[in-house]
Image (cartoon, coloured by chain):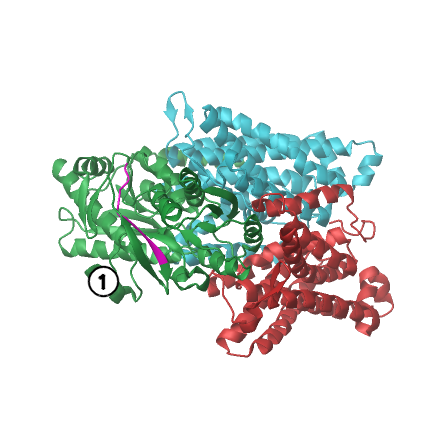
Chain colours: A green, B red, C cyan
Amino acid sequence: MLKRLSAVFLLLALAVWVPVAQAQQGPIKIGAILPLTGSGASYGVWMKGGAEMAAEEINAAGGIGGRKIEVIYEDHAADASKAVNAMRRLVEVEKIPFTLTSYSAPTLAIQPIGSQNKVVMMNGGGQSDNLANKEYLYNNIPVVSNEVGVLADWLTKEKKFKAAVMIVANDEAGRNSAKSFREKFTADGGRVLAEEQVALDGNDFRAQLAKLKAAGGDLLFISSYGRNVAIVADQARELGITIPMAATSWVQIPEVLKAKGAEGLLTTRLPFNPDSPFARKFKERYKTDAGFFAVQYYSGTKIFAKAAEEAMKKAGGKLDGEGVKNAIESLKAFDTISGKLVFQPNHAAVMDIEVGVLKGGKVEVEKVVKANP
Amino acid sequence: MDLVLQLLATGLVVGSLYALCALGWGLIYGTTLHFHVAHGAVFALAAYYAFVGQKLLHLPLVVAVAGAVLAAAATGLLIDLLIYQQLEKRGAFRTSIFISSLGLLIVLENVLAIVFTPDPMRMDIGKLNTALIIGPVFLTYLHILTLCLAVVGYLLLMAFLKWSRWGQAIRAVSSNPEMARTVGVNLSKVHLLTYAVGSALAAPAGILVAMDVGAEPFRGTRFVLLASVAVIMGGIGSIPGAMLGGIFLGLLENLGIWKLPSEWQSAISFGVFLVFIVVRPRGFFGRTIHSAEI
Amino acid sequence: MAAYIAHYLVMVGIYTILAVSLNLLVGYAGIFSLAHAAVYGIGAYASALVALKLGFGFWGGLVVAAAAGACAAALVAIPSLRVAGDYYIVASFGLQVVILTVFMNWTDLTNGHAGLAGIPRPRLFGLVFDNPFKYVGLSLALAVLTYAICRRLTDSAFGRTLRAVREDEIAAQAMGKNVVLIKIVVTTISSALGALAGSLYAHYITYINPSSFTLDESIFITSLVILGGTERLAGPVVGAFILLAVPEALKFLAIPDTVAAPTRQILYGGLLILFMFVRPEGILGRGRAKSA
């Protein structure tokens, strides 16, 4: 029975052997693979909102080369497998030339697919150092070692911390940032006494926190992001961990800013102006404060528009991923609402980094470290 | 040393939760021989019943919790009445009961995921969240309550089984269903009661976890799995065994990470269990196996 | 549209291998294992690792995966020598959890949660299987091969002995059958084939991480077997065709993404319950099944 069936399907398979081509009429479709649900849903709200607003503005101004832009949103929910499935669908069925992407592990997982199929990927959120130097992948956000370096310097030289313990998300981003922190902190003369791993979607970290408490130290570095940071901070204080906590900018989502345990958090910040016209428009439309990541995905979409226009000019109206990539490589610098963005040879960006203390839901900036490209 | 004491305390609290689940599951399994994985769904539902009671119906916490326990007992009873007993009437095999239970677990958990989203639903527990410091150990009042409820639950169950008429009927059915039927025990009613009592024991566990870290749709699978492990280790048919098995698992999970990295927590508990099942399948207090074949 | 069908067929091939090999255990040997996804995962990781770290191609990976599966079979077999029925189910749960924890935490080897990306597509005489259309032939060919192997096995004297052991282990032993050896052989073949499916999967999706090999996946494979029917080897094949069509069919209804996954699960779970009521022997079962 199976033999007969498989013969039939083999014939079907041959019959549908069609060449893969890209649409040159109708709207320009691009992808956006974002954390729309799960522990990182707060980022998703910003990312989707930013991209949506950018797409609307682009279309209102006539589109790109006369064609409207259409963003296809996919949810990876922090699961790289979902991102891969979404990417394959976008590339093989929707034939997109470009996609926005987010988070480190999902982006790393889809990168080979993009590179193989000549589809440009723009990451505005993931920060693992491994995201640099990858074919067809561009990061309009600095990799985490930049922020971690600035943070570690400030913590050792100005705040005089000597011995740290770390709680680390057991995924690519968490582990990479922990590795980076360990390197920089020890290079600055500090010691890392202990490290414990936690699941991104977990909600009980007391066992790990108890072990860290027993290890001592004068600083707790939280190498994690999303909702669990709020839980980590609260549970740490509950367990009687009184030492100060530190983390990089990616933790600054509403749940964490509100958390009692996060009060006094020592943290970095990437430039974001909460009073800009963009921020105000965002708040009005989505009824929630805009954040850094909203700007990132707004910029990412606009960068695509610019590069696509350039590519279409060079190719007589035709648009494909390779053309977009070449355009980005030749333009290198783009004007965004947060200033000039320059892609470095390693395909990542550099930005000014601020350091400060989280007080009453807001970061009080103490110092600004200028970017040096 | 401080760390060991803290882990010991946490282990006892977690063990209490496992024990409550194991007591309920073990009672049901020992009496009906149903591999009732849907017990995990009852565990999860109890938490949501309490959440709805407090947050949507604005009932005081105690009322919401009590209502949730009753609702969970009713849910367990209905599962037996509407699904398992109906299947048995049609001559279903034990595997079919297990499969239907699995299907039910999947359906109920996912319905919860759609209605409430997979994100944790937190409840207001007011003072219970206050931390209590006993020497080097930190616990909240909620944790103390968990320990107490496990002990109380165990004692109540033992008393019920030993001294009440219905409890004795359950024991009779548990040790020899055919004989029990011959002396006039109504098997169907005893089963329903068993499900009600067993589910009423799982409910506090689900609610306590929800009060601590929020209600989640899929948490029950893990708990029912551990409950079955606890029951096997304690010995099928033994209530003290189930209690001990649950506490033992909780301690194992937490003390196990004293020296080993904490991400290996699950592997430690289940690894030990796998070795155990090969070495002493009968469990600490169990009867020798022949009654648990498919 | 054509791409959807091609993708569906590739997955049918992969799941046919998984379900048929599981049926060897469940339907023929009476070993109700819920750890098959772990075995699937072992094959996937083995194949991916030798490809990424040692430069093996798909074909080498396939062989290594089957070998890894065969070795892992010991883990599946040992508890079955001591316990059966419900005890075995719980033991297999435990095995599944332990192996998944290893995938998640032995990060030096498996890269943990981040998974392994960039797994190469298969090549054969210069032809690269780089899109679903080309992969369909490969997937279905391996599925047919698996089915043929299992068919050979179950139709032989060994197959009859298997069934004897399932019906009454003590009697089979009394008749001189080496039950231990039989169990070891059947779990080895079942696991080697399950691992093979893992290799096929890894080189198709080009990315694997632990979340593809969880208990939920084991339960899904088991439902393919139960719904298709354990009595006949072709049962799981039918199960695969039907159950894999469900998510594809759902895509045509405009269900929001967040609700789509739980909805699919509700359908699967509902089908399981329904079948236990109306047709517990499965779609291809003949009459009432004697045992699982």
Magenta stretch bounds: A347-357
Q: Position of residue A209 (x, y in %)?
A: 54, 53
Residue B55: % across, % down: 49, 74
**Image position of B212 (left or right of B189):** left
Relative horizontal placement of residue C157, taking residue A150 as reference (left or right): right
* Location of residue A283 (image quadrant): bottom left
Q: Is residue C150 visible?
A: no
Residue under label 1, please give it.
A275
Q: In the depicted view, which residue is nearer to us: A367 or B243?
A: A367
Let me know if residue B245 is in the magenta part.
no
Residue C132: image location, x then y, percent: 39, 36
Q: Quadrant of the N terminus of chain C?
A: top left
Q: Secondary structure at mark 1?
A: loop
In the rendered image, is residue B6 in sight?
Answer: yes
- Chain of the residue under the numbered disc 1 shown in the image: A
x 72%, y 30%: residue: C157
| Mark 1 crowd level (few <14, some 14–19, many ≥20, 10 Å Cα) | few
Residue nearer the viewer, A240 or A116: A240
Q: Along the horizontal axis of the image, is A238 left or right of A353? A: right
Residue B259, x across and y down, in percent:
63, 44
Say if the magenta span includes residue A355.
yes
- Which residue is at the front of the view, B73 or A43? A43
Query: Disc 1 marks which amino acid?
Result: Asp
